[in-house]
Image (tube, grey):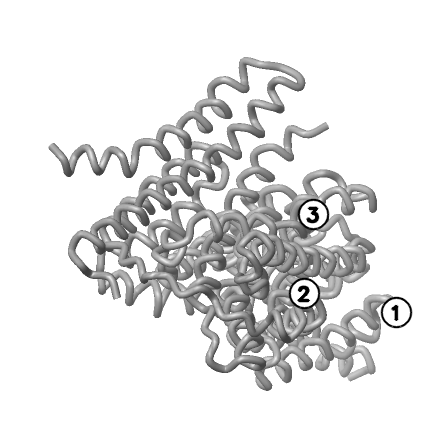
C-alpha cells in the first residue's frame, strides 16, 4: 500500500489544485457575471500553473527521498 | 516588334518601373533587406536556418513580379479588390496568393502558385508552427524544470513582462484588442506561438507580425548580451550557484508530468490545444524513448518545418502585402515587448538574488524569455565571460522550459479571452 499512498501524495495535491482551477474557469465562471466572474477566471488561470508546480515539487521531493534512502547522494 | 513587346520580355523590371513610387521603393528595400538577412545569417549574427531561406524568398518574391494572365488576374482582383488593368492583366507573382479565400478561387490558385499548397494546407492552419513545436518538445528535458519548479516558474512569469505590458501599450497606440494581443506575444519570444496567435486573432496582420517576431527572435542572440551587461554588474554575473544534490527524475515521471500538464492546459485552453498537444507529444515521445519517432520529429519535421517557415515568411514579404502603415508601429512594439521581457527576467533574477541572501545569479532570469535554448545559452555565455568555471546552464534550462510553458499559458489566455473583450 505504501507505494500507492506515496504516488497519491506526489500527484493528488497538484492535480486537485489544477482541476479546481480548470473547474473554476470552465464550469463556474460561465455561470457568473461581472467582477466575480473576472475574479474566478483569473484565480482559475493562476491555480493551474500553481498545481503543475506543486506536482513538480512533489516529484522532486520523492526523487530526493529515494536517492537519500538508497544512499545515492553525491 | 515594338517597345511594349520588348518590355514584356523583362516583366520583372517592367512591373517594377510601372509600379507606384512607394511600392517601387518598398520592393527595392525588401530586395536589399533579403540580401542583408542572408549575409547576417551566413555570418551567424542571425539564425541561418531561418534567415537564409527567408532572405532569399524575400528578395526573389519582390524581384519576380510579372503581369498575370487575364484568368489569374480576375481571381486575384476578386481577392484583393484591386482593379485589373485595361489589357486584363494585373501585377502578381507565381509564388503564392495569401489573400485568396474563396474555395473556387483557391482551387484555381492551388494549380498556379507553386507554394500555395504548402501555404494553404500547412501554414495558414498553423500546422508548420505545430511541427516546430513538436521538435521543440523532443529537444526539451522537463527534468530541468522538475528539479527547480517554483524558481523556474517564478522567473518565467517575470520574463513575460513584455507580453503583459505591451498589450495595453499597443491598445493605446490604436490597435484593436486582437491585434494588440498578437503583437504583444512577441514578448514571449516564441515564434510558433506568435504565428499561432496572429493567425487566430489577427489574420490580416499575421504576415508583418510574424516577420517582426522572427526577425527580433534572431536578434535576441545578439542583443540580450548587451542588456545583461547593462543591467547586471560583472561581480554579480560571476556568482556561483549553490551546489545542490542532483535530482534524478525518472523518464516515467517526466512522461506522466507531460500527460498531466498537457491535459490540464488543454482543458483550460482548448483553442491553444493543437499547439499544446504538439509540445507535449514531443516531450512524451522523448521520455518514452521512441527512437524512430524522435528521429522523424527531430530530423525531418523540425528542420523541414523550419525551412518552409523561413521560405514562406520570406515569400509573404511581398511589398504590396507588407505596405501597411501599421508595420512601423509593429516594429517598435516588437522591440519594446522583447526588451521588457528581458528586463522582467533580470528583475526576477534580482528578486531571487535578494531572497536567497545574495547567492542567486540574477543573469539566470533572462532565460525565462522562452527562446529555447538561445536565452539559456546567452546567459551561460555571459557568465562564462566573467567567470569561466561558473556553470548556470542546468538552472537556466529549467527556467527556459518554464518560459515555454508560461508563454503557452499566456497564448491560451489571449486566444481564449481577448476575442470576448469589448
Name which residue lies at 44% across and 41% down: B273
Q: What residue sits right under mark 3 in the picture?
A: B78
Name which residue lies at 74% across and 65% down: B319
Numbered disc 2: secondary structure: loop
Q: CB of mark 3 within 8 Å of CB of mark 2? A: no
- The residue closer to the viewer here, B177 or B201, is B177
Mark earlier in primary sequence (1, 2): 1
Asked if badge 1 and badge 2 are on a common chain, one would say yes
Say few, some or many: other residues with alpha carbon within 10 Å of mark 2 (under 14 / 14 to 19 / 20 or more). many
The chain identifier of the residue carrying mark 3 reads B
Q: How many marks?
A: 3
Left/right placement of residue A48 relative to residue B8 reads: left
- Which image quadrant is residue B17 in? bottom right
- Which image quadrant is residue B2 in? bottom right
The chain identifier of the residue carrying mark 2 reads B
Q: Which callout, 3 or 1, points to the residue nearer the camera?
A: 1
Name the outermost residue toward the left: A1
**x, y percent for residue B122:** 47, 55
**x, y percent for residue B390:** 48, 75
Numbered disc 3: secondary structure: helix
**x, y percent for residue B274:** 43, 44
Left/right placement of residue B304 relative to residue B114 reads: left
Mark earlier in primary sequence (3, 2): 3
Left/right placement of residue A21 relative to residue B288 reads: right
Q: Quadrant of the C terminus of chain A?
A: bottom left
Amino acid at each position: 500500500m505504501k507505494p500507492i499512498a506515496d504516488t497519491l501524495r506526489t500527484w493528488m495535491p497538484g492535480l486537485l489544485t489544477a482541476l479546481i482551477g480548470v473547474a473554476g474557469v470552465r464550469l463556474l465562471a460561465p455561470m457568473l457575471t461581472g467582477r466575480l466572474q473576472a475574479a474566478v477566471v483569473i484565480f482559475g488561470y493562476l491555480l493551474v500553473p500553481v498545481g503543475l508546480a506543486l506536482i513538480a515539487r512533489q516529484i522532486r521531493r520523492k526523487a530526493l527521498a529515494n536517492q537519500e534512502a538508497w544512499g545515492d547522494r553525491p | 516588334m515594338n517597345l511594349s513587346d520588348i518590355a514584356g520580355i523583362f516583366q520583372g523590371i517592367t512591373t517594377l518601373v510601372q509600379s507606384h513610387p512607394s511600392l517601387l521603393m518598398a520592393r527595392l528595400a525588401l530586395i536589399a533587406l533579403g540580401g542583408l538577412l542572408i549575409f547576417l545569417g551566413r555570418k551567424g549574427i542571425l539564425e541561418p536556418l531561418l534567415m537564409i531561406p527567408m532572405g532569399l524568398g524575400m528578395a526573389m518574391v519582390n524581384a519576380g513580379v510579372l503581369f498575370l494572365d487575364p484568368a489569374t488576374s480576375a481571381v486575384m482582383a476578386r481577392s484583393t479588390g484591386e482593379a485589373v488593368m485595361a489589357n486584363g492583366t494585373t501585377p502578381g507573382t507565381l509564388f503564392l496568393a495569401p489573400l485568396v479565400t474563396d474555395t473556387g478561387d483557391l482551387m484555381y490558385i492551388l494549380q498556379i502558385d507553386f507554394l500555395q499548397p504548402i501555404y494553404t494546407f500547412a501554414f495558414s492552419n498553423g500546422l508548420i508552427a505545430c511541427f516546430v513545436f513538436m521538435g521543440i518538445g523532443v529537444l526539451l528535458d522537463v527534468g530541468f524544470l522538475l528539479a527547480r519548479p517554483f524558481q523556474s516558474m517564478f522567473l518565467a512569469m517575470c520574463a513575460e513582462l513584455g507580453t503583459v505590458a505591451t498589450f495595453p501599450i499597443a491598445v493605446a497606440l490604436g490597435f484593436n484588442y486582437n491585434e494588440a494581443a498578437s503583437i504583444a506575444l512577441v514578448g514571449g519570444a516564441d515564434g510558433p506561438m506568435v504565428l499561432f496567435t496572429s493567425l487566430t486573432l489577427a489574420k490580416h496582420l499575421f504576415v508583418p507580425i510574424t516577420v517582426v517576431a522572427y526577425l527580433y527572435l534572431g536578434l535576441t542572440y545578439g542583443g540580450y548580451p548587451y542588456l545583461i551587461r547593462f543591467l547586471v554588474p560583472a561581480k554579480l554575473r560571476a556568482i556561483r550557484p549553490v551546489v545542490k544534490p542532483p535530482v534524478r527524475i525518472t523518464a516515467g515521471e517526466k512522461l506522466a508530468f507531460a500527460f498531466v500538464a498537457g491535459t490540464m492546459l488543454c482543458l483550460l485552453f482548448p483553442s491553444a490545444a493543437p499547439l499544446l498537444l504538439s509540445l507535449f507529444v514531443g516531450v512524451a515521445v522523448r521520455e518514452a524513448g521512441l527512437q524512430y519517432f524522435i528521429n522523424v520529429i527531430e530530423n525531418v519535421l523540425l528542420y523541414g518545418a523550419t525551412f518552409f517557415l523561413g521560405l514562406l515568411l520570406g515569400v509573404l514579404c511581398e511589398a504590396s502585402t507588407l505596405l501597411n502603415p501599421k508595420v512601423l508601429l509593429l516594429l517598435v512594439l516588437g522591440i519594446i515587448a522583447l526588451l521588457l521581457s528581458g528586463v522582467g527576467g533580470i528583475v526576477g533574477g534580482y528578486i531571487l538574488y535578494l531572497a536567497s541572501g545574495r547567492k542567486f545569479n540574477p543573469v539566470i532570469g533572462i532565460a525565462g524569455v522562452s527562446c529555447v535554448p538561445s536565452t539559456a545559452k546567452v546567459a551561460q555565455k555571459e557568465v562564462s565571460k566573467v567567470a569561466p568555471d561558473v556553470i548556470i546552464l542546468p538552472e537556466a534550462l529549467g527556467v527556459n522550459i518554464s518560459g515555454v510553458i508560461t508563454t503557452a499559458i499566456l497564448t491560451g489566455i489571449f486566444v481564449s479571452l481577448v476575442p470576448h473583450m469589448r
